[in-house]
Image (cartoon, helix red, strand yellow):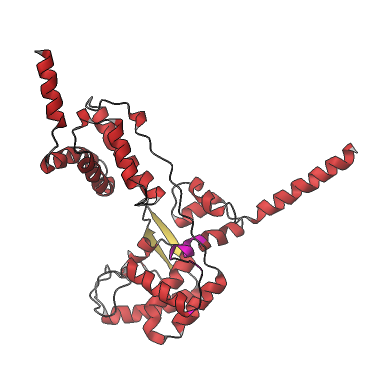
Amino acid sequence: MNNTLQVYRTSLFDTPLTSSSNYELANEYLQWKQSYTKSAYRSYKVWVHRFQEFVNKPPEHLRHTDYSAFANSLQGRFASLGIQYALNIVHNYLRFYLEQGRLRFPLYLARVPKGYPNSHEAITEAEYKKVIDVLRAQGKRSLRDLAIIMLLHDTGMRIGELVSLSVEDIEEDSSAVIRTEKTIRQRRVFWNPDTDNVLQRYLVDRVNYGPANELDALFISESSWNGKPFSRRSIERIFRMALLKAGIQRKLCLHSFRHAFIHRLAKLSVPDAIIAQLVGHSTPATIAHYTKLSRPELKEFAHKQLVFATHESLLAA
């Protein structure tokens, strides 16, 4: 009889789940998550559902190989930091069922690989000036594009943070409090007077011809003035076209402004902890990837040890 029961249980678990069953399993966890952190619920939702639909099994019948198969399916499709983020979410999802006694394999077998930022070239000041000159040559019709590029240069914002700006966010002291994209915290960014001049000129057109609500997006399509935020892809297209017209052949992207911003701070010997706050990283450790080749004191310390070694050698002789 026990054997019959075991066969029944095995066949039950081996039967693929329905879409509604997968949805119910994922939502059981998500509803619990939402009970104490709504922001996490929104960001977790996509990956929890993706994982559950991929494995198509109840937690009682999951094996570590199912987790590994899902992790391998992400390779080549997402950046390493994105994979780390996704698998951390899945790991928390599995822990939820482990603590209920429903997960049968030890959670240490569901390893989360360390992610590393993609290596991007930092745009130089000479290249930035060429891009700005190209946009200025287009006259008033390029005010929006000029303001976008100048803000990226001055603030080191992520592109997602920039497109989330509203008219209301722009303050009189050439600054804005923005919503940090990855940590959902807030931080203040600053820009120089030249950038503010361009931005204020753009704002005149934006307020006169765009939606009147101050909560509407700052950067919108001028062709419709319908208040819909300007898309990342459109901004990338503008930047690529400006690079082409400026004769810049180096492989640069919008994130190159962020790298250049961090490099400038590092060359000024700003501590990693301060840089992390300025660019919206959660810990100084995540800044080291950007700053390790940009610090002037590294060369200074290297030369100091050479002088010390030479001095010690002379004393020994």
Viewer-proximal residue among 205 and 285: 285
Of the pair 73 and 172, the residue shown nearer to us: 73
Residue occupying the point 13% across, 33% down: 15
> Residue shown at 39%/85% (left/top)?
140
Q: At 48% across and 64% down in the image, what residue appears?
A: 256
Can you say which quadrant of the picture contains the N terminus?
A: top left
Q: Is residue 29 above or below residue 218?
A: above
Q: Is residue 173 visible?
A: no
Measured along the vertical axis of the image, is residue 90 above or below residue 292? above
The quarter of the image holding the C terminus is top right
Asked if residue 26 is among those painted magenta in the image, a careful observer would answer no
Left or right of 105 on screen, residue 263: right
Q: Residue furthest top?
A: 1
The quarter holding residue 221 reads: bottom left
Question: Residue 142: in sight, yes or no?
Answer: yes
Secondary structure predominantly adopted by residues drawn in magenta: loop
Q: Position of residue 178 (x, y in %)?
A: 37, 60
Location of residue 279 with respect to 91 vertically, above or below: below
**Count of number-bearing discs:** 0
- Across and down, in percent, residue 74 comes to 33, 47
Q: Where residue 167 sits in the image (x, y, percent)?
A: 32, 70
Residue 271 spot, x, y in % from top left? 57, 51
Vertical placement of residue 3 versus 19, above or below: above
- Span colored in magenta: 246-259
